[in-house]
Image: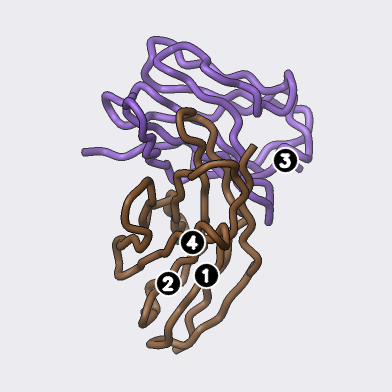
Amino acid sequence: EAGVTQFPSHSVIEKGQTVTLRCDPISGHDNLYWYRRVMGKEIKFLLHFVKESKQDESGMPNNRFLAERTGGTYSTLKVQPAELEDSGVYFCASSHVTRSVNEQYFGPGTRLTVT
Amino acid sequence: AQSVTQPDIHITVSEGASLELRCNYSYGATPYLFWYVQSPGQGLQLLLKYFSGDTLVQGIKGFEAEFKRSQSSFNLRKPSVHWSDAAEYFCAVGARGNNNDMRFGAGTRLTVKP
């Protein structure tokens, strides 16, 4: 079974530019999560999709970030315009919809560098 | 809301030595607890988890962790470290009944000396 995949693995952009990150969850996983880790800090929750619906986007830093999951399969996270503080590693995770326990499977992350 | 503290940013151990990585959590009830490992260029891999029952949890790669409610801790241990264990380790706590509410610690980087 293929795991969670993310593209690109690394992106370097200039301040003010736009970047779109992509996440392909494990097939059949309705839950999809985005997290971010700024250098040396903890991994922070950004948002959660259940199929194509945003269940919780309370962790999104500001309106420069837009996440979509059209059709309930892969998801994109767009940053527009990018700022220096957006640099970090963006992780995607997916899980089954279960009654009680949530075990999330993580992708390798996209390292975003804004210069 | 729950929170996680990993007091050690970086730990160095010799190959073959024992290892203990500390994790303390804050949560008002019994949490779900996880340890993840990230090797260079890889995603976060689940090492082990605690949901209920036996407080000593066995994981993959010879790791174990013990949930101690009285100390609000979930320390990760391994009796003999291998060079391939060099990686970054993250402790995480999840809220029961809320599938998206997971909090991670800042991570502990493990270096293994030959």
Query: Disc 4 marks which residue?
Result: B68
Q: Are marks 2 and 1 in contact (CB under 8 Å)?
A: yes
Of callouts 2 and 4, the N-terminal one: 4
Q: Are marks 3 and 1 in contact (CB under 8 Å)?
A: no
The secondary structure type at the circle numbered 3 is: strand
Nearest the eye: B4 or B9? B4
Looking at the rendered structure, the kind of residue marked 3 is Val
Residue B34 percent across, percent down from the top left:
44, 51
Question: Disc 2 versus disc 1: distance between alpha carbons?
Answer: 6 Å
- Chain of the residue under label 1: B
Query: Disc 2 marks which residue?
Result: B77
Rate crowding at label 3 as few (under 14), some (14 to 19) or many (20 or more) other CA atoms within 10 Å. some
Q: Residue at x 74, y 23 (%)?
A: A62
Question: Disc 2 versus disc 3: distance between alpha carbons?
Answer: 37 Å
Residue A92 percent across, percent down from the top left:
48, 35
Residue B61 percent across, percent down from the top left:
30, 67
Residue A16, image quadrant: top right
Question: Disc 2 versus disc 4: distance between alpha carbons?
Answer: 14 Å
